[in-house]
Amino acid sequence: MRFILLALAFIGLAPMAEAQQRTRLTVYTALENEQLAPFKQAAEAALRDIEIAWVRDSTGVITARLIAEKANPRADMVWGLSVFSLLQMEAQDMLEPYTPQGAEALRANMRSSRSPMTWTGMDAFVSAICFNTVVAQQRNLPRPATWQDLLDPRFRGQIVMPNPNSSGTGFLTISGWIANMGEQGAWAFMDRLHENVQQYTHSGSAPCNNAARGEFGVGLSFDMRSVTLKNQGAPIDIIVPTDGVGFDLEATAIMRGTRNLEAAKRLADFTVSRTAAELYGRFYAMLALPGVEPTVRGYPAEFAQRLVNANFAEIAAARERLLAEWQRRYDGKSAPR
Amino acid sequence: MAKPFLAQLGAIRPKASADETSLRVIQALGFLFLTLALALPLASLLLRAFEDQHGSFVGLRNFAIYVTTPSLVRSAWNSVWTAFITTCVVIPLAFAYAYGLTRSCMPGKWIFRAIMFLPILAPSLLPALSLIYLFGNQGMLRWMMDGGSIYGPWGIIGAQIFYCFPAAAILLSVALSTADGRLYEAAEALKASRFRIFLTVTLPGALYGLVSASVVVFTLVVTDFGIPKVIGGQFNVLATDVYKQVVGRQDLNMGAVVGLVLLLPAILAFLLDRWAHGKRTATLSGRAVAYRPKPRLRRDLPAFLFCLSVALALIVIVAVAVWGSFIRFWPYNLSLTLDNYDFARFDTAGWQAVWLSVKLSLITAFVGAALIFIIAYSLERGPQRSFLAAPLRLLATIPLAVPGLVLGLAFIIFFNHPANPFGIIYGTLAILVLNSIIHFYTVGHLTAVTAIRQLDPEFEAVSASLHVPIWQTFGRVTLPICLPAIFEILVFLFVSAMTTVSAVIFLYGPDTKPASVAVVHMDEAGQASAAAAMACVILAISLSAKLTQLLVGGLFARVTSAWRR
């Protein structure tokens, strides 16, 4: 009897002992759902004594949570969050300075300029147009190739885009216009675009989801989303405009105050490694680590070139002002149409 | 109606009895609980309204910035008029429906009782999807929109009417369910017309229920951001302003400012509640004979037809979404499939999320219902003049006016504070339970209060004179009579915890992601059919809880109200 009890105790304890050896890192992320499993698998294969516990939500929710938890951080790391969020947290002194091994190899504008670094980039994602071909045929909409094409009066009331005051995707879109057209030009463009916009949504994914459902002809969103929808059979084309795109950087950082600093540093090292970059390349066309060939398809060849010179820090610094200006111009007068 | 003599005696108890002391202690414990779980967290967030992002005190500067933002007044006005119209539509609908349920002899009452709950049995995404499938630009009933769009105020009002109906119907059916049959007999003997009976007996008896239902609906509309976010287009309301500040701009300080503005309805609600309290009359005195409606075709048939049409409307909205969970992709590939129910394909937590939600909701329901009812009882039957009674009442009304996302952030800031000993519950299931109890406290509280107020204080007075301790009266009289209301609270908490998103989205940990949050994530990821599927699983679980309640409640009523016959 005693033997059986002892055996049972062993059976019960063995997995626990194994689990105790692995350090459990709580990682906050805004990555897409389908990316979580492969990312976790790859990292745990490379770092056998580390276990990743994801908390995933939209960029806005995760960032708000991180900032609210500031006094007593629960996340050890952030892996896959908009650089604009990270810069905001950097300003509030929430990031642990650490230069991951090999981070110097990343493109200069895709990593923190501080020494030691506070964040490192993974990849850039871009704004895109979700264009419903069935609706286009019904309503006789031309296929847009550039942002300027969207100013065509035939698009009046057909365009949906995220409100930059509610959604990171919305900000990514307008920051792209500002970077490409200059601030004056961008406001002039948005003034005219406003005439064609049917709705500014609070959610960054709603415009593309609704375009896919045929609720609207054109949804401004980002590239990843569109692929999922297309695979389900939505009659949408994903158009990356040729006259410059909005971009956002997905990045990694260690939270100041983490209780697992050593493990977090090793995971940070992994996130800038070549193995990790190849993983990012399965989903994104523009990687922070040069020399890795992305395997994702459907992007214009010269696309990467257009992004290289983006200055994220400058845009982040102007964020507050740009959002306030946007709100003044378009949010106030929006009588529902 | 004059108060029975004994009841008046009961109201002027000369000296504190042991009963009074124990009720006072419960009031104090209730006050402590709500202070710790509601007042302090809220205060720690709302204080941020007076700070900048680095934590230094800036006085009223944030308010000044907010007030000078041109969109504020518009948002406030939008909130008020959409909430007003919704209330004006929902209350008569819910009253008529509840009247049919409680005061007629129409057939199939228990089915109508179950159907009335449909709107809150599933996450709000489900009606939103359904409205899009029905009235959206590709919708099946698009011709009914007459060229208008559901993306705007009318979409918000439509969805809110659907969503607020159950809360109003619950409160009103509790209010109408107990009545003194003798009043009706007396009125009939005096040859009062039916209309006059309705105006002078039925309505005053339900007055408290009507006031609280209106307050609940109005506040629900003002504070909900889920519906305006999905279907409101760019129609700004106060709740989406909070969302913009907190989630869009990550400005907790400005979010706190708008959160404070949103508390105004709570204060209004509190004042109204006090007013109705002053006018209350106990409708069920110790000598009461339970009112039993007699069959009368001229009342029963219209009641039946009315309830049938409301029920059908509710069923259609839900049925469309259920169908939506089996199709491949709206509206382009309507072939049916079961794949959407294979949740692991869309979300790493898979079915785990569903079981977690069930656990969360069960604990919330049982712990919450017990707490809410006991605290409400101590308030209604305990010393009214005690210095705790008024603040406790206010605390019980506040949760209704706190948008989920404000409550969620408040919980983070308070419970995650390094110096807070209660911080151990952070990141666990316990904080989700506590949050859900607090978030849905008010409707449960109002239901309990409505039920308790219909019992004459004479019960306690008589017990006191017979030297029966109050807990015995509570256990033998109050509890059995109020059991239907308690079941109602229990199931309300259960289904609310199954479907809630706005607060828990800030609080779940790596291992505690509820199904309702998974629904939002799948929808955001463009997997609308999978989202609908998980919403339907939630619906099925909530519906079985509701049906169990009706079954058990029916059996119980047969046993416990035998004495009334």
Image (cartoon, coloured by chain):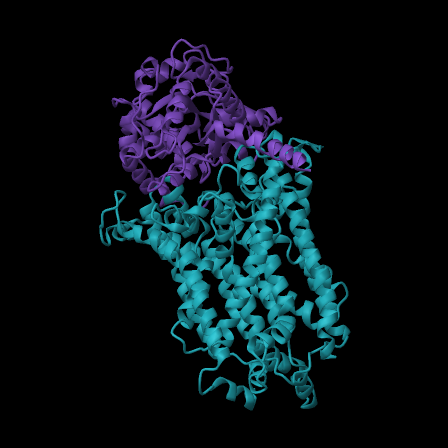
Chain colours: A purple, B cyan
Residue lying at the far front in this picture: please name it. A2
Q: What residue is drawn where x is 27% and y is 29%?
A: A184
Asked if A212 appears above or below B465 in the picture, the reply is: above
Q: B299 left or right of A61?
A: right
Is A138 drawn above or below residue B445 in the view shown?
A: above
Q: Position of residue A273 (x, y in %)?
A: 41, 15
- Count of numbered circles in the view: 0
Quadrant where the N terminus of chain B sits is bottom right
Using the image, determine if residue B336 lies above or below residue A112.
below
B59 or A304: nearer the eye?
A: B59
Q: Residue B265's spot in the image, x, y percent? A: 42, 62
Q: Is residue A306 depicted above or below B78 in this figure?
A: above
Image spot of residue B455 (x, y percent): 59, 77
The residue shown at (60%, 76%) is: B472
Determine if residue B162 is in view: no
Question: Is residue B348 left or right of B240 when viewed as pictured?
Answer: right
Residue B46 in the figure: left or right of residue A61: left
Query: Is residue A194 shown to the viewer in this render?
Result: yes
At a point 64% along the width and 73% down the height, the residue shown is: B481
Q: Quadrant of residue B552?
A: bottom right
**Quick one: quadrant of the C terminus of chain B?**
bottom right
